[in-house]
Amino acid sequence: MERKQIYIQFFGGLKDYFDKTLTLELPSGSLISDCLQQLMIMQPAAIGLLNKCAIAINGTINKENTVLSHNDHVVIMPPYSGG
């Protein structure tokens, strides 16, 4: 099965669990949800935070059922607050 390489960038509290950037290979046809599942396997302690994140692909916020393409740039943003 063909594999796709995607580039992931993490923000906020996710940097406590992952390096700021990560390259991940996933099977062709993988969805954002598949990417998140792989990240949860890699770092189970981050599951709670990953479940609350917004996901952008190539600068556009997407839903978990969006298909990833080769060389996509995925940004994972946890909820934040401030004042």
Image (tube, grey):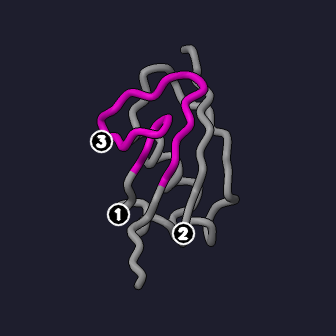
Answer above or below: position of 67 versus 48. Answer: above
Residue under label 1, please give it. Answer: 52
Query: Which amino acid type is shown beneath numbered disc 3?
Result: Lys
**Count of labels in the image:** 3
Q: Which quarter of the figure has residue 4?
A: top right
**Residue drawn 67% across and 40% down?**
23
Element type at marker 2? helix
Cα gap from disc 2 to disc 1, whole angstroms: 12 Å
Dot 2, crowdedness within 10 Å: few (<14), some or many (≥20)?
few
Query: Which amino acid type is shown beneath numbered disc 1?
Result: Lys
Cα gap from disc 3 to disc 1, whole angstroms: 12 Å
Residue under label 3, please give it. Answer: 63
Answer above or below: position of 17 versus 62. Answer: below
Q: Which quarter of the figure has residue 3?
A: top right
**Residue drawn 58% across and 57% down?**
10
Mark identifier at residue 12: 2
Question: Residue placed farthest to the top in the image?
Answer: 1
Res. 48 visible in picture: no
Element type at marker 3? loop
Contact, CB < 8 Å: mark 2 with mark 1? Answer: no
Of the two numbered discs 2 and 1 in the rendering, the one whose residue sits closer to the viewer: 2
The residue range painted magenta reads: 55-76
Q: Is residue 23 left or right of residue 8?
A: right
Dot 1, crowdedness within 10 Å: few (<14), some or many (≥20)?
few
Answer above or below: position of 30 versus 42. Answer: above
Element type at marker 1? loop
Q: Horizontal and vertical percent for residue 69? A: 49, 23
Mark identifier at residue 30: none
Front-lying residue, 58 or 20: 58
Q: Is residue 57 magenta?
A: yes
